[in-house]
Amino acid sequence: MKVLIVGSGGREHAIAWSVAKSPKVDKIYCAPGNAGIAEFAECVNIKAMEFDKLVAFAKENAIDLTIIGMDDPLVGGVVDAFESEGLRVFGPRKNAAIIEGSKAFSKDLMKKYKIPTAAYENFTDPDEAIKYLETAKMPIVLKADGLALGKGVLICNTLEEAKEGVKTLMLDKQFGDAGNEIVIEEFMTGREVSVLAFCDGKTIKCMTSAQDHKRAKDGDQGLNTGGMGTFSPSPFYNDEVEAFCEKYVYQSTIDAMAFEGRPFTGILFTGLMIT
């Protein structure tokens, strides 16, 4: 079996490391890959967003399965490109990957289907966002709508910080088009837990929980990052919490996406705040 992995980060390294242990796999390619991935796979000089080249490579090399690791190509529709050519690929289609690609979409979905989530408002106008903040309770959370490598979330303790956050995201475009729309969200305290689940569009199979530490600097004094470190499982994700989340969060989300005509297949990431 020949496998192609798309991406170049630690996530793809972990995927390649795991796939390499399978006796069913004869050959692994990674596009574009990195030096660490090269220990397990043949790295190919094709970028993750070059869909036509990726599809052509998969055809020419008789790839049996392509695994998409990165968010950007998923949101851009790489799975659709592979499926349109009859190629087997693992990941959500473009219309389902929006749940990761747009925080505004995912928040509206949760609100519509009564999936537990923090109170929020979406804004495309920076002036309207600032007007809302002037009467909001601090601290408050600002989130770039689009993909920002896990860094597009600002926790603002004062009104001045929040106004500066709107400027950073929407006017200065620190994260590019990801800041064209922002989500302003209620600040909640508790324990953050991350759970990944395999999905086939109807059912879910959850992996064990993990606790991600996102903020830079000692004592969480810095800004959010893509992740400073993680341990697993989380001691705060007990059987009671798991049962609640499987019924009211994970399965409800998959059901909601199916009802919206956006069946989600692949791995669903859920960021939880246990209050």
Image: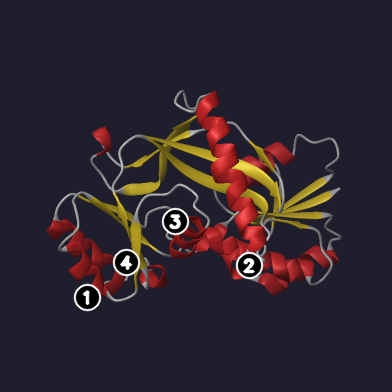
Which of the 4 quarters of the picture holds residue 92? bottom right
Three-letter code for the amino acid on which mark 2 is drawn: Lys
Query: Helix or strand or loop: what does disc 2 sit on?
Result: helix
Q: Comparing marks 1 and 2, which lies closer to the viewer?
A: 1
Q: Which residue is mark 3?
A: 149
Query: Helix or strand or loop: what does disc 1 sit on?
Result: helix
**Which of the image's four quarters has the C terminus?**
top left
Three-letter code for the amino acid on which mark 3 is drawn: Leu
Eyeballing the image, is 106 above or below 221? below
Q: Comparing marks 4 and 2, which lies closer to the viewer?
A: 2
Query: Helix or strand or loop: what does disc 4 sit on?
Result: loop
Graded by Cα atoms within 10 Å as few (under 14), some (14 to 19) or many (20 or more), the crowding at tag 1 reads: few
Residue at left 46%, top 23%? 235
Q: Name the N-terminal-most of marks 4 and 2.
A: 2
Q: Name the N-terminal-most of marks 1 and 2.
A: 2
* Residue 158 in sight in this render: yes
Q: Name the N-terminal-most of marks 4 and 3.
A: 3
* Residue 10 in sight in this render: no
